[in-house]
Image (spheres, rainbow, N blue to C red):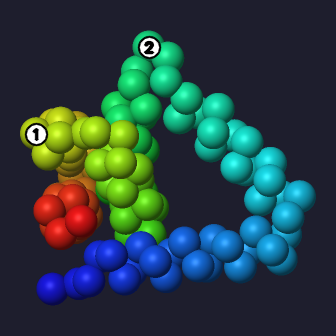
Amino acid sequence: MTDHNEALRRTKARMGALAKAAPDTFDGFARVAKAATKPGQFSAAHKELIATAISVVEGCEDCILYHVDGARRHGAEEAALIEALEVAIEMGGGPAVMYAGKALEAFRQG
C-alpha cells in the first residue's frame, strides 16, 4: 500500500521547489487556484471534490493526493468523494476506475 501522507509531503515539497525556481509563474498559478477554490455556489469542499474528479480523469496522481487532502481539510465526507468519483468514472472510463481507486485509498489513509 502506498503511504499517501508521505507521497503528499513529497508532492508539496516539489511544488515548493518549483515556486522558488519560478516565483512569478507560481504566484500567478497560486492566485488562480485561490480564486477557483473560494466558496461561492459550491463550497470549498465541493470545489476540491470537483478538482479530485478532474485529477482522476486526467490521471494525475499528485493532483489526486493534493485535492483529496484539500477536500478532507474542508470537511468533505467520503460519501461525497465517492459520488464525485462516480462522475469521474462516467467521464473517464476504465482508466478513471483505476485512479478513482487511488483517490479513495488516499482519502481513507489520510
How many numbered marks does the figure carry? 2
Image quadrant occupied by the C terminus: bottom left
Q: Identify which residue, 109 or 104, lies in the foreground.
A: 109
- Up the image or down, 17 lies above or below 33; here it is below
**SS at mark 2?**
loop
- Give neighbour class at mark 1: few <14, some 14-19, many 20+ (Cα, 10 Å): few
Q: Position of residue 35 (x, y in %)?
A: 64, 32
Q: Identify which residue, 8 or 96, lies in the foreground.
A: 8
Dot 2 or dot 1, earlier in sequence: 2
Q: Position of residue 41 (x, y in %)?
A: 44, 13
* 28 with respect to 2 (left or right): right
Label 2 is placed on what type of residue? Gln
The residue at the point 67 percent across, 73 percent down is 16
- Up the image or down, 107 lies above or below 86; here it is below
Image disc number at residue 41: 2
Q: Identify which residue, 53 or 6, lies in the foreground.
A: 6
* 82 with respect to 64 (left or right): left
Q: CA distance from mark 2 to mark 1?
A: 20 Å
Q: Position of residue 49 (x, y in %)?
A: 33, 41
Instruction: Read off the residue under disc 1.
Output: 79
* 63 with respect to 26 (left or right): left
- Up the image or down, 61 lies above or below 42; here it is below
Residue 54 seen by the camera:
no
